[in-house]
Amino acid sequence: MGRSINPLHFIGQDGWTVPDPDTAANSEGLIALSWDLAPDLYDRCYDKGIFPWFEQEGVVFWFSPDVRSVTPTSEVKVAKSMRPYMNKKQWRFSVNTEFEKVIEKCSEVPRPGQAGTWISETFQTNFLHMHQLGMAHSFEVWESDELIGGTFGVMTGAVFVGESMFHTRANASKFAYIGMCQYLSRNGVEFIDNQLPTEHLDSLGARNIERDEFLKLLEVHSEGRERVIIEALTKTTLPL
């Protein structure tokens, strides 16, 4: 028999509750809609593995996909192709020094098969607000004084939810991701929630798990846990 179709939930209004992650309305995991974005929405929904994917005509679409990509921070892969960048020490890594610029770059970089970006002004404004609240963080890569790569995301308990990444030099986004995993691992964060699987993430050590396994991971590392505090870090090199 085919999968049953559940009605969509509407979240963010007075008295709203977080939907059961297993009640997604379609195979892609669409589960809820909201009129806007707010830190409270992220705070409550991310604990249950529900995230906003895009905005269309003023409506935000929230998802809980069947398969989730996660990376254990201590198991990030450093491919042989990355070792020269780390050995030469030409690139530097930093944390929370240019959050707004990283978001702008992520929204501007052309991506194959995508006509636009999901990081609309609504998303950018909300992420900036969450950064000010200590919820959202950026990880940057520098060549001299030029920002050439980066990634950003949201901390929920002891799980970091990766949102997007960019590069203007080959492998700079991988450098950012490796640095992010190393930094978060040292600060007690054991997992990155990559949200959706990609070959790029798989090459960096991500593994794809079913929703049930992912929700159990969140129960241990996110729900009821105090949010890990991520401090700023000035430019430094990455260890091999």
Image (cartoon, helix red, strand yellow):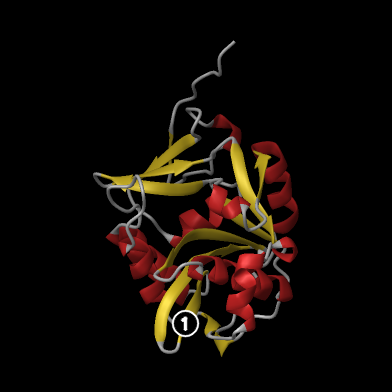
The image quadrant that residue 3 belongs to is top right
Image spot of residue 170 (x, y percent):
46, 67
Camera-side residue: 232 or 113? 113
* Residue name at image x 56 percent, y 59 percent: 161
Q: Which residue reaches farthest left?
A: 57
The image quadrant that residue 145 belongs to is bottom left
Camera-side residue: 19 or 137? 137
Quadrant where the C terminus sits is bottom right
Image spot of residue 63 (x, y percent):
48, 41
Image spot of residue 168 (x, y percent):
39, 70
- Identity, as a three-letter code, of the amino acid under mark 1: Trp
Q: Which residue reaches farthest top?
A: 1
- Is 81 situated left or right of 130 in this image? right
* Residue name at image x 32 percent, y 53 percent: 117
- Can see residue 53? yes
Circle 1 sits in a helix, a strand or a loop, which is it? strand
Tell me: residue 184, above or below residue 66: below
- Is 219 situated left or right of 41 in this image? right
* Residue name at image x 47 percent, y 71 percent: 150
Tell me: residue 142, above or below residue 68: below
Question: Local crowd at mark 1 within 10 Å, few (<14), some, or many (≥20)?
Answer: some
Tell me: residue 20, above or below residue 195: above
Write down the residue under mark 1: 142
* Residue name at image x 52 percent, y 32 percent: 24
Quadrant where the N terminus sits is top right
Tell me: residue 221, above or below residue 144: above
